[in-house]
Amino acid sequence: MIEPVLTSTSALPDREERVTPQAYYALTVLLAAYILSFVDRNIMAVLIGPIRQDLDISDFQYSLLHGFAFSMFYIVLGIPIARLADHSNRKWIVTIGIFFWSIMCCLCGAARTVVTLFIARIGVGVGEAALSPPAFSMLSDFFPPSRHARAFAIYSLGVTVGGGLSAIIGGFVYQHFAATDGAILPLLGHVSSWQMTFITVGLPGLIIVLLLGFIKEPVRRIDRDPIQAETGSGFREFWSYLKRHSRIYIGIIGANSLLTVMTYGTLAWFIEFLIRTYDVPRETAGLHFGLINIVAGSLGALVIGWLVQPMVKRNIIDAPVRMMLIIACLALIPATLGPLSPTPAIAVALACPTMFFLNGFYGPGITALQAITPNRMKAQVTALSLFFANLFGLALGPTIVATLTDFVFGNDADLRYSLAVLPMVLCPVAALLAYQALKPYRKLLAFRSTGPALA
């Protein structure tokens, strides 16, 4: 088993550590921020039709606004922000990031051209880059290692709840303003219904900023194992450590990245798939998929996250990586058959297990990375994982689907086939990457628990 980690202010072993009310408050506020981040980044999935019509763009051009514009700086800034978080006040980094992305989301509603919307989406990505790496680092210090898997699983609910709420809230907010033909705002004049939707979902971030003021920066834990002393915390040491354990990190981060491609591709296009294939009304498609994401997706994140801890206690120390392998195999069938369904009822039914599995790999992946990474490198490793997940998933996931639709199948109505291709290609490769990481992962944890400085 992994040796307990001590805080710098206590000599109590991990099993005797108590979780403070401040830890639960921090988890609640950070979860709220994460939910809002997914609402703000994914709200465009409900607005594909109106945005395409107003700006006169294709699926491929829309995908650049949805994925590439958001992710280009979100990806690039993640690692330097995480580097800063590993050596400075994480709470203020998160606070500034939330404030900035909320303002930029509102400015998406002021965009009148493709260029201005593209720039505003970049700003949303810049702000959101400051959330998860510092948040995971803070949670790893607020909670003892024995509670990490479940704390991370709860935090990862932001993906499912936020993604679901973006579909539900986006659909109803858009319909509300569509009924009034938008709104008249000071300075901006007439604002269309899709623009008012951006402004409406952007404003709540300012409330989260106020709630963050009641969180205290947690005391950093000090790893009690030879790896921490051996590696230090410099940039060169960070990359040296990753190189020594490259097979593990490539396996975990690679599998996570490929599964993220499927997740973001589905989030970006499933609602539009229901509309184009079965002529489902926009608000109905958003409601159905939103509820699936919230219920099935949240259950996947919680159930799978909860299963990891008892598996580790039964001495299955590679449980997080093993769970990623299982998920990659199980997601293949429903994710492939769902878009090919003859009726919308079957497509929606198969979306339930698809979203269950596609939201279940995130917690185990982060848990695995946190377990093998020294404390002063945790935020940087999280950022590195997010870098590749978002490079392939957020930046390319929606665009790959659009590229297949526009340039391979050549028909908007063939969106269903584009969605079906993804799991057929990605699930087997993700499973293979997770499998090859199992043995070295077990070996590294064994070294850390027994104490020899061999890692």
Image (cartoon, helix red, strand yellow):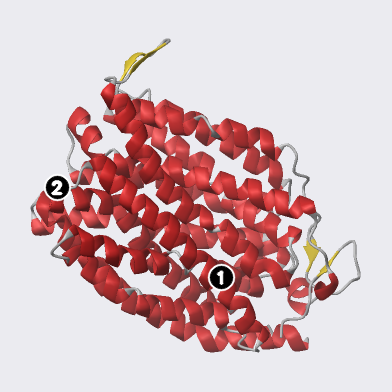
Left or right: where does residue 247 sit relative to residue 422? right
Frontmost residue, 211 versus 366? 211
Left or right: where does residue 209 sit relative to residue 386? right
Q: Which numbered circle lies on residue 279?
A: 2
Frontmost residue, 308 versus 284? 284
Q: Amino acid at mark 1?
A: Gly
Frontmost residue, 292 versus 444? 292
Residue at left 66%, top 53%?
Answer: 27
Q: Amino acid at mark 2?
A: Asp
Q: What kind of element bears circle 1?
A: helix
Q: Which residue is mark 1?
A: 305
Left or right: where does residue 284 sit relative to residue 18? left
Locate the N terminus and report the quarter of the image it occupies: bottom right
Q: CA distance from mark 1 to mark 2?
A: 36 Å
- Residue 209 appears in which quarter of the rendering? top right
Dot in front, 1 or 2: 2
Where is residue 236? Give x, y as percent: 64, 64
- Residue 245 appears in which quarter of the rendering? bottom right
Residue 264, visible in the rendered structure: yes
